[in-house]
Structure formats: C-alpha cells, structure tokens
Image: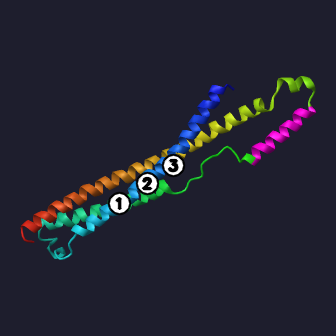
Amino acid sequence: MSRDFYELCYDQYKQEMAEADGLYQKAAVMLGVIPLLGAVMVAIGRVDIVNLCSVRVDVFIFYFAFLVATAALVVSVVFLFKCVCPQKYKTLASMDMWQKWRDDYQRWLDEQDDEWKETTSLDDALFPCICTRLAEAQAINAKINENRRKAFKRSVQLAAIALAAIAMQALFGLLMTLQGV
C-alpha cells in the first residue's frame, strides 16, 4: 500500500471524527434555541380566551399555532437527543494492542532467516494493517455521522416549523389584542 493511500485513509478518518465534534457544537446551539422558542411561545400564550376557541376563528388559529409549535419543539428535542446520543465510533485499537502486535511481529522476524529480515521491516508490515483498519473505521464512522446529521437536520427543520407557528401565534395574538379580545 502506498503512503498516499494511507494519508487519504487517515485524513478521511480524522474528518469523520472532527465532524462528530462539530455536531456536538451545533447541537449545543440548538439546546439554546429550542428552550428560547418555547419560552417565547409560552410568554405570548393566553389561557383567558380558551372558551372562545370554538366561536372565533382567530382564537382557534392562535391555539392551533400554539399546539403546532409545541409538537414541533417536542419532536425537535427528540431528534436532537438522537443526534447527541453517544455513539460507539470505530477506532483503530489501543496503543497497547499495537505495541503488542509490534513486539510479536518483531519476535517472528527474529526467528526468520536473514534474507527475510532484509526485505521486511517492522513498519512496512504495520503499514497495511493500519491502512485497512483506517478504511474500515472511516466507513463505519461515516454511517454513524450520516445518521446523526440527518437527525440534526430534522431537529433544525422542526425548530423552524415551530418558529413559523410561534410567529403565527404572535400575529394572531397581536390581532386579538388590537380587537380588544
């Protein structure tokens, strides 16, 4: 295996691990946005006009927007938890395992004849093993990150729906206030 292939595998592996960290940072922003939206939704909510819900369309739309925003925020939180829920990422192996592998391989090389020792170095033997593990780990980690990205995207989309519903709630709340309801 070439050094270029190793660097490609290693770069892809590092990119997936960095993306996992980035998702946690983005999720932290959402953990601030969702409660803020919920607080705004509750602050503009009114309970004194619930009895008018079946009589006035504007009151019905006001409460319908409240319910849509509530449902969207709850489901957004569910997807956000799905995004940040700890996942088991594939790693190469512990350094102890690699040291043991090197020691075992060195013992095996010591037992071989001199011609074999001259053509095979310890690092040359380790290189294909590391490349294979990097490629396997990257493929597994990419799938995990893809699922987490999808969950985060859904969380953001639902928060946007909640924002639109809260804006609708605020608009109808303002209209009702102007009408003296």
Distance of mark 3 from mark 1, alpha carbons?
20 Å
Measure how far apart labels 1 and 2 are at the Cα level. Answer: 10 Å
Q: Magenta span: helix, strand or loop, mainly? A: helix
Pointers 3 and 1 in contact (C-beta within 8 Å): no
Height in image: 38 above or below 90? below
Say which amino acid is labelled 3. Asp
Residue 94 in the image, given as x and y percentages of width and height: 71, 48
Q: Earlier in the sequence, mark 1 or mark 2?
A: 2
Left or right side of 160 for 84 = right
The disc, 3 or 2, on the residue closer to the chain's N-terminal end is 3
Nearer to us: label 3 or label 1: 3
Amino acid, disc 1: Ile
Q: Amino acid at mark 2?
A: Ala
Inter-mark Cα distance, 3 to 2: 10 Å
Percent of width and height locating residue 180: 7, 71
The answer to which image quadrant residue 7 occupies is: top right
Displayed quadrant of residue 11 = top right
Residue under pointer 1: 34
To which residue does mark 3 refer?
21
Q: Residue at x 29, y 57 (%)?
A: 162
Q: Which residue is at the front of the view, 53 or 28? A: 28
Which mark is first along the chain, 1 or 3? 3
Which residue is pictured at 26% across the width and 65% down the height?
Answer: 41
What is the quadrant of the C terminus in the image? bottom left
Q: Secondary structure at mark 2?
A: helix
Which residue occupies 70% across, 46% down? 93
Task: Say the numbered circle drawn on residue 13.
Answer: none
Residue occupied by mark 2: 27
Magenta-colored span = 96-111
Q: Quadrant of the N terminus?
A: top right
